[in-house]
Structures are given as structure tokens and as C-alpha cells.
Image (cartoon, grey):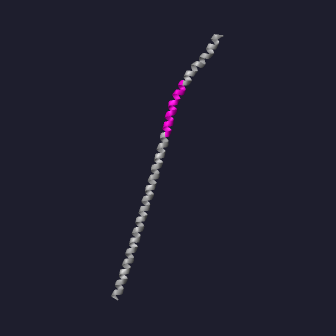
């Protein structure tokens, strides 16, 4: 009788330990999965941030180029204007 009880108790304890180990394993796997997801999300956010910064940098460079080209175009137009004005005057004088 005692042996049967001890055997039953031992089997119950083994079953309980196995269940505990199974739950701990599941919890570890859940935590690892969450950590992978968190890292993946951080990596995506980092890449998105880099992409945003790259685009902003390109826009700034484009604006700087346009700003540098604008005075050049204005100078060219200013240089052309007097010659456009002189031509009719010269034509009138030559008549």
C-alpha cells in the first residue's frame, strides 16, 4: 500500500516537474519571440530614420544647388539685359 502511494506520489511529482519545465520553456520562447520582434521593430525604425535623414539631406543639397544656381542665372540675365538694351540704341544711332 505504501509502495503504491509512494509510486503514485513519485509519478505525480515527475509529471508536475515536466509540466513546470514545459511552462518555463514556453515562457522563455515567448520572451525570445518578443525580444526578436522588438529588435526587428527597432531595426525597421532605425532604417526608416536613416532613409528620412538621407532624403532630407538630398532635399537640402538640392535646395543649396538651386540657391547657388539662382544668383548665377540672375547674373546671366543682368548681363544679357544691358546688351539687349544697347542693341536698339545702336540700331537707332546707325540710322
Q: Quadrant of the C terminus?
A: top right
The residue that appears at 39% across and 74% down in the rendered structure is: 18
From the top left corner, tell me how far across and down residue 8 is, in percent: 37, 83
Q: Is residue 82 left or right of residue 24?
A: right
The residue that appears at 39% across and 71% down in the rendered structure is: 21
From the top left corner, tell me how far across and down residue 65 is, in percent: 50, 33
From the top left corner, tell me how far across and down residue 64 is, in percent: 49, 34
**In the displayed image of the protein, which residue is found farthest to the right?**
95
- For residue 58, above or below residue 78: below
Q: Quadrant of the N terminus?
A: bottom left
Residue 71 in magenta? yes
Secondary structure character of the magenta stretch overall: helix
From the top left corner, tell me how far across and down residue 62 is, in percent: 51, 36
Q: Is residue 69 left or right of residue 89?
A: left
The residue that appears at 49% across and 39% down in the rendered structure is: 58
Number of marks in the rendered image: 0
The residue that appears at 57% across and 19% down in the rendered structure is: 82
State which quadrant residue 94 falls in: top right
Q: Where does the magenta region start and end?
A: 58-75
Amino acid at each position: 500500500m505504501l509502495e503504491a502511494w509512494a509510486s503514485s506520489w513519485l509519478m505525480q511529482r515527475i509529471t508536475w516537474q515536466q509540466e513546470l519545465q514545459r511552462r518555463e520553456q514556453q515562457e522563455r520562447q515567448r520572451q525570445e519571440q518578443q525580444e526578436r520582434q522588438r529588435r526587428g521593430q527597432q531595426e525597421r525604425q532605425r532604417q526608416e530614420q536613416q532613409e528620412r535623414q538621407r532624403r532630407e539631406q538630398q532635399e537640402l543639397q538640392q535646395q543649396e544647388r538651386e540657391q547657388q544656381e539662382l544668383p548665377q542665372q540672375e547674373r546671366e540675365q543682368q548681363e544679357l539685359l544691358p546688351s539687349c538694351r544697347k542693341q536698339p540704341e545702336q540700331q537707332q544711332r546707325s540710322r
